Image: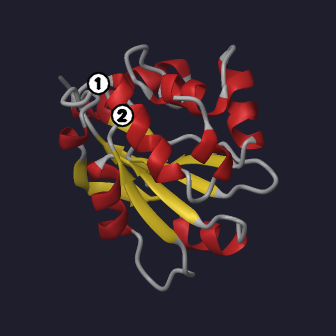
Amino acid sequence: MPASKRNADSSAESFPPILGAEPRVLILGSLPSRKSLDKRQYYGHPQNAFWKIMRALLGVQGPYDERSAAVAAAGVAVWDVLASAERPGSMDADIDLGSAVANPLGPFLERETSIGLVAFNGRAAESMFRRFVTGPLRAVDFVRLPSTSPAYASLTLAEKTDRWRAGLAPALPALKNAER
């Protein structure tokens, strides 16, 4: 396969953030999967648990545009650590870290002063943030949550949802009393 075709097939770019007026939480993934890229949607793989968890926690439902708007209205911003990278397939382990370019998360957090919690959607997102986001950051809290990826199958959906509820509750007080 010619190099230009191979690079086009393995190049991945993040989307703009889902962002409302007063976000309190920033949820960071690593980089969209191939299915998400094809659909132009965060967490677009039908087996990814992200939107199921958001439905359980925040009542988010409907088509993608409605879910995105509802998440933003609830005070949750969604973005990825990486703006782009070479990655054949969808696995985080396949990301070529030598080609990775981070999103401007430091300036983003400086601008979005209402964000008090950065929640990592899995270990890879946290690891990439710590590796690529350099320089001083304003004081925010950080929490690593279980990955919503279908590749992370060691927890049930209910267990992931409970851990997400506990992790986000300090910044989204309505979750403390949410029905389980």
Q: Inspect the image, locate mark 2, and give the three-letter code of the amino acid beneath it.
A: Lys
Q: Residue at x 47, y 54 (%)?
A: 119
In the displayed structure image, the side of residue 50 where residue 41 appears, left or right: right
Question: How far from the left and from the top, in percent, is residue 174?
Answer: 68, 45
Above or below, 153 against 136 in this view is above
Q: Which residue is mark 1?
A: 156
Question: Height in image: 16 above or below 135?
Answer: above
Quarter of image, res 70: top right
Q: Is residue 107 above or below residue 45?
A: below
Residue pushed farthest bottom? Answer: 136
Contact (Cβ within 8 Å) of mark 2 with mark 1 = yes
Query: Would you place residue 48 above or below residue 91 in this image?
Result: above
User: Mark 2 Cα within 10 Å, few/some/many (few <14, many 20+)?
Assistant: many
Quote the CA–CA distance across marks 2 and 1: 6 Å
- Indicate the position of residue 138 as horizontal and vertical percent values: 57, 81
Quick check: 127 left or right of 145?
A: left
Q: Mark 2 — residue?
A: 160
Which amino acid type is shown beneath numbered disc 1?
Thr
Q: Which residue is painted at 29% across and 54% down in the image?
A: 99
- Residue drawn at (36%, 55%), measured in percent from left and top? 144
**Residue 41 visible to an observer of this rendering:** no
In percent of width and height, residue 82 lies at 42, 52
* Tag shown at residue 177: none
